[in-house]
Image (tube, coloured by chain):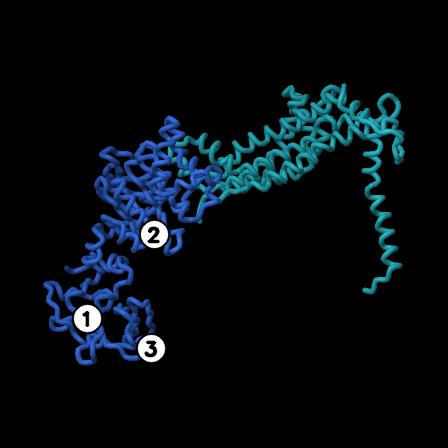
Amino acid sequence: MESNPATSRLTAIALSFMAVIWVSPFSWLILNAFNPLSTGQLEIPRSIGLDNFALAVSGNAGRQFLNSMLIAAGTATLSVVVGISAAYPLSRLRIPGRNAFLWTLVLLRMLPSAGVLVPLYFAAQRGGLLNQFGVIIALTILNLPFTLLLLKNFFDTVPIELEEAAYVEGASLFQIVTRIVLPMSRAGIAVVWFFSFTGAWNEFLLPLIFARVQDAFPMSVGLYAAFGQQGAINYGFLTAFSIIYAAPAIGVYFLLRRNMNTGFAGVGVKG
Amino acid sequence: MADVSLRGVRKSYGSVEVVHGVDLEIKSGEFVVFVGPSGCGKSTLLRMIAGLEPISGGDISIGGKVVNDIPSPQRGIAMVFQSYALYPHMSVYDNMAFGLKLAKTPKDEIDQRVREAARILQIEGYLDRMPKALSGGQRQRVAIGRAIVRDPRVFLFDEPLSNLDASLRAQTRIEIAKLHDTLTATMIYVTHDQVEAMTLADRIVVLNAGRIEQVGTPLELYRNPVNTFVAGFIASQRMNFTPVTIEAGKLVLPGNKSLTLTHPRLANVRTIGIRPEHLVLADAANADLTGTLSVIEQFGEYALAYVELPSGDLVTVKLDGAPDLQLHQTVHIGVPPDAVHLFDEAGRALR
């Protein structure tokens, strides 16, 4: 195809226009968050300050940040602990139908979680778990199928001979798992932890249903509730709050990238 | 040091029995090699001695004590795996110290023992490296070092050299022989490589299909194999087997030449075996076998000539030096009667 300066200039203008449209929500978010006198318009702020952020980490909003952290870290840690305890035997013991079992779990997980919300709610109500702990347990249960599948596959890559060598040297099963299998599956455990963390951090529906008082809201629900509070929308607060809400996802992304590079199962064997 | 004895040891997986009642006495300080083709049960036998595989019948005792129900760590054994099984997330030092740390050995004793083993194996320079930074041969030494630091009564080696290349294998073989000399420990070594078996063993145990075929020193097996299996398995060039018929008290070879041999049970002979290195070239007048040269492999110091007999059988002849033979030429072979092994219908040796 022939390219003449006129058409390429037109293409450039068209693409820039698309780019502006594409980034405008982000620009709006950032410009408003750093503008203490934000009005909700896409404009260059007349003054720049962190007042909105101060507002977004104090009082109710700060509590919601902690709630989110608690739910996300709690879910991630519980998923990893339960996942390891279940995936290791699934990887090592010849349980008949273990693969069918795993894939059935995954199939069940494919159902939208809203579909199981009602039974989940009543189970939590009966168990007295309509609180953050209940959210953590419910999210862990929903996470488990994929957690199990992922961890089992990671454990499968740890050569059985390493465990036999450790056993001959006098290691107990607990020592074999904690000193050989887990360190070698570090990358897999990190992936599971971070994914569970982001999943739980982003979760909206379950905390909304389970935690029915403002004090127990995580940020996802808090953001929703912040609309129209005190009669008007405080765009500065809302945008700063959104940025803080999105930050962990970015942090997790970088942590994940670093940890994904440390998979080294299989190095100790063969030459 | 401890002796190891197996009495009627069996192993079955479900209804399939893979080791059929093995009896064996291994003396303290002896170097015994289990050799056999894949699937003969040699590794299973070793893993049963190690305690990694439960036994289905019989008794295994180490140092005079039955260890059937004693877990592996308390058997006083150390094992070197075919894949080395080094812990990839630990340094060489930590790999070697792992077992001692588990046993809560005092720190300075661990240090002293690890450094002593590293000195013996000449790996002192790599103690801080990770396994992935080592070559195959170095990893092999670390794996052996990990066994040495535990000062076991019995060393178990499961095909330790099969992942090394040929030259490194020969070198490590010599080192293992030296090691046995220095450590004076009982060693049980599994391999499918009969060269390793011949060169390392005080005694070789030849296994086939879950049974012991023969136990003896390397030279005993070489000189007096009890059957065609052992005869064919031991030595680097496989023994030639030729069917024979008996006529008027003489062995008749293919091609109708006869061998003068006396044996009380000559009438039972169905096959003779003769090693390639014992066959000689002859001239047409006194040849025992005649055929055409189909392949010749020149090694410089010796050559292997593959001679096709009119019957279609291939006979291997090992010749010293670099013989001047042309492909497809007629080759006359002489069979020295005193080097012939006689086998009956079932493949058992007649002595």
Q: How far apart are the two marked residues, 1 and 2, measured between alpha carbons?
A: 36 Å
In contact (CB < 8 Å): disc 1 and disc 2: no
Pick the front one: A216 or A235: A235
Q: How far apart are the two marked residues, 1 and 3, measured between alpha carbons?
A: 22 Å
Pick the front one: A147 or B177: B177
Disc 1 versus disc 2: nearer the observer = 2
Where does label 2 land, which residue? Answer: B171
- Amino acid type of disc 1? Val
Q: Colour of chain B?
A: blue
Q: Which mark is residue A76?
A: none
Disc 1 versus disc 3: nearer the observer = 3
First along the sequence among labels 1 and 3: 3
- Amino acid type of disc 3? Leu
Where does label 1 land, which residue? Answer: B335
Q: What residue do we see at 72% from left, 21% from top?
A: A216
On the rendered image, what quadrant is the C terminus of chain B found in?
bottom left
- Amino acid type of disc 2? Gln
Q: Residue furthest front?
A: B125
On the rendered image, what quadrant is the N terminus of chain B found in?
top left
First along the sequence among labels 1 and 2: 2
* Rendering coords of residue A97 (x, y %): 51, 41
Where does label 3 land, which residue? Answer: B327
Examine the rendered structure and indicate whether residue B59 appears above or below residue B251: above
